[in-house]
Image (cartoon, rainbow, N blue to C red):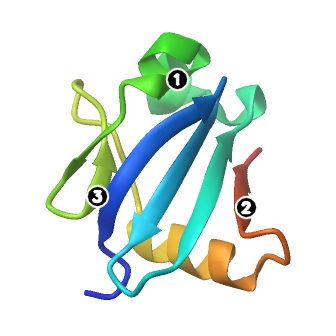
Amino acid sequence: MYWDILEIHAIAPRTLAVLFADGLRGTIFIDISFCTGVFDVLKDDVIVSQAFIENGVVTWENGLDLAPDTMHKEIKNSPNHCYSLKR
């Protein structure tokens, strides 16, 4: 799908750069307020930076993942191509 993630890189604490299959580039910022419940593990900046791609999805070793279709939509519609995950 066009929203599959092809590349991901940690570029700053809590911030990941992504490239989608359709060529869209952007960043994801994971605010500490987002890190509750199953996302609690993402309070650790080192864990955030260890994200990898599995089947076109941003994933972590514990099986946690982020919905690529939502990320694509938010990045595409953001004037600075950034998606901030917050509660």
In front of the other: label 2 or label 1?
2
Q: Nearer the viewer, residue 33 or 49?
A: 49
Q: Which of the two labelled residues, at mark 2 and mark 1, occupies the earlier sequence position?
A: 1
Residue in the image at 62% along x and 28% along y: 35
Instruction: Point out which mark residue 57 bears.
Output: 3
The quadrant holding residue 21 is bottom left
Residue 57, image x, y percentages: 28, 58
The quadrant holding residue 77 is bottom right
Q: Nearer the viewer, residue 36 or 55?
A: 55
Instruction: Point out which mark residue 86 bears.
Output: none
Residue 70, relative to residue 12: is it above or below? below
Rounded to the nearest angstrom, the CA distance separating label 2 from label 3 is: 17 Å
Residue 7, image x, y percentages: 34, 56
Q: Amino acid at mark 3?
A: Val
Residue in the image at 38% along x and 79% along y: 3
Name the image quarter holding the N terminus.
bottom left
Residue 87, relative to residue 47: is it above or below? below
